[in-house]
Amino acid sequence: MNRVLRSTCKLLAGTAGFVLLAAGGIFGAFMYFNSPPSGKLRNTENAKLLDANDAHFLVREGESATSVGGHLKEAGFIKSLFAWQLLCHFRPAYLQAGMYKLDSKTNLIELYEFFTEGRQILIPVTVPEGSTLKRTARILEEALICSSEEFLSAASSAAILREYNVPASNMEGYLYPDTYHWTPNYPASSVVRTMAATFYKKLGDLGINTNTMSAGDIYSKVILASIVEREYRIADEAPVMAGVFLRRLKTGMRLESCATVVYVLTEIDGKEHPKTLFYSDLEEESPYNTYIHKGLPPGPISSPGEVALRAAFFPAETDYLFFRIVDPKAGRHYFSKSFDDHIKAGSFIVK
């Protein structure tokens, strides 16, 4: 009996020792493969070195975990692709696309958590009120969010235009000017959709129910708002300007907005923004030139902000038909009911 007991104890001790040895080996292997490599980081297609210890690393949209691991191994961030695959298998989670700032001392699990928790680099990008599509495209390209060409293409996408019920050839006027936070190399279509969704949310915040309006009615308001955006300097004058333009439309007068002429010169003709408008500029042939053609221009001339949108959707009821700037420094305008009164106030060219 004692012999059997001793044998059993020896067997259990041997088994426990083997288990402990195996556990120790597994733990040691885990610690080894979890620790970052001691070698130098390398520039690759997905990793761009910032210095000897830091790099920007790109996870592409729809990229598999194995592909991400391969790029991490290639750049020198992990020791073993197999260890990465095991980690992904036992802790399955979605790896979020975007640009990440990684350093050479980050271990395997920390890298995995960076991607699954979405700790991407977020770049603040401010699109000023009154920006055009082309100016917005330049801003995004300079911020490394997306290329100008990709943005303009997305802003003209038939699918996106249908999605946001825009009766035009592009999203001009429907991309709300604001400060956004995006990762580098962000999909241009997502940029456009984010800005368009913000535009409609802003309309809702202003108490505007677009579900009760036709696409054409909304478009006309956006065009008007885009003109007011480029004309007003002081917020309390914006609804009065909108009222003036609407009264002109009602009476069959031309809008004669200098902002539309500037749009023709800069966005269509590709010229520098003029410091002064001359009579010859007012004769520039274009359907956007409201000194020549009656009615609203064929499309928006800028991205209107909150003040201009509110003014266009809730204009002031006014008898005014004219306005001109009288205090350029403060941005104050003089409004008048008759052309004679307007002439007495000074030049009728509004800059």
Image: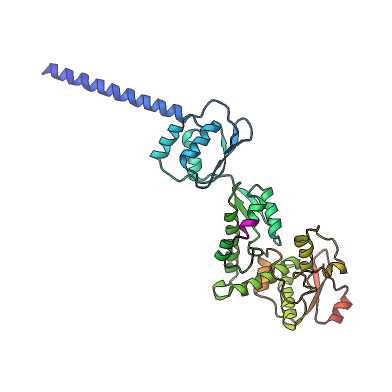
Give the camera-side residue of 335 and 103. 103
Q: In this orientation, which residue lies closer to the viewer: 254 or 112?
A: 254
The image's colouring method is rainbow
In the image: residue 229, left or right of residue 1: right
- Residue beneath the point at 58% across and 37% down: 45
Residue 275, image x, y percentages: 84, 61
Residue 102 locus on image (x, y percent): 56, 37
What span is colored magenta in the figure? 152-157
Question: 318 left or right of 145?
Answer: right
- Compared with 133, 186 (above or below) is above
Give residue 305's position: percent from left, percent from top.
67, 64
Quadrant in which residue 272 is drawn: bottom right
Picture residue at 58% right of the left edge, 30% below the top: 41
The C terminus lies in which quarter of the figure? Answer: bottom right
- Residue 105, percent across and down? 54, 31
Residue lying at 52% horizontally and 47% vertically, measured from the top left: 61
Q: Is residue 269 above or below residue 187?
A: below
Residue 296 sits in quarter: bottom right
**Residue 156 covered by magenta stretch:** yes
User: Which residue, as the protein is rendered here, is positioned at the far left?
Assistant: 1
Q: Is residue 38 above or below residue 229?
A: above
Quadrant housing residue 322? bottom right
Position of residue 7 in the picture relative to residue 257 (left or right)? left
